[in-house]
Amino acid sequence: MSEAVREATRKGRPEFRNIHITDITMKYRQPPAAIVSILHRISGFVMFLMLPFLLYLLQESLRSEISYAHFAGIVDNPFAKLILLGLSWAYLHHFTAGIRHLFMDNHLALDKDAAQKTARWVLVISLALTVLVGLKLFGVF
């Protein structure tokens, strides 16, 4: 063996470690399109998980006036209002991101600048609508 080969085997191979979730979330700044995409998946998953529970609540509230009054009392709880606000955000974000995807399916806003701009609009519109729902839910108007 030559001296260069011996030197390379003595040093060993470089060690590469897996990237941890904190590396992704803390070190790297995600573009708005990536944030919207991740939130779109999360909001869809949350709505999918909560759908049976919401359908059960709807079914029980439609049984009689007494059951409706019972569930109306539950919704007056601030913790229940926060859960409803979170579900409202999930729906509104998923809806606005879905409209963005429809535009992209029609080959509109596919270049980088337009995709980032529409992603920012999705974030702004969904949060603004969620604030309006929250204000209505907590009795401001």
Image: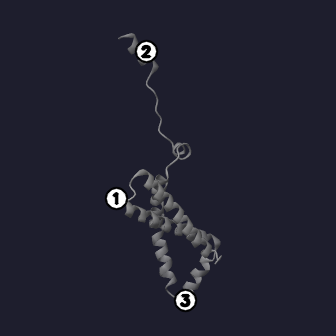
* Residue hosting label 3: 65
Label 1, label 3: how many angstroms apart (C-alpha)? 50 Å
Q: Residue at x 65, y 76 (%)?
A: 140
**Amino acid of disc 2:** Glu
Label 2, label 3: how many angstroms apart (C-alpha)? 84 Å
Looking at the rendered structure, the secondary structure element under dot 3 is helix
Q: How is the image coloured?
A: one colour
**Amino acid of disc 1:** His
Q: The C terminus lies in which quarter of the figure?
A: bottom right
Q: Residue at x 59, y 82 (%)?
A: 70
Looking at the rendered structure, the secondary structure element under dot 1 is loop
Q: Residue 113: x, y in percent?
A: 45, 52
Tell which tag, 1 or 3, sits nearer the viewer.
1
Residue 22 higher or lower than 70, as above or below = above
| Comes first in the chain, label 1 or label 2 | 2
* Residue hosting label 1: 107
| Comes first in the chain, label 2 or label 3 | 2
Label 1, label 2: how many angstroms apart (C-alpha)? 55 Å
Looking at the rendered structure, the secondary structure element under dot 2 is helix
Q: Residue 92: x, y in percent?
A: 49, 68
Q: Residue 89: x, y in percent?
A: 53, 66
Work out whether residue 119 or residue 13 is closer to the camera in this orientation and state it: 119
* Residue hosting label 2: 7
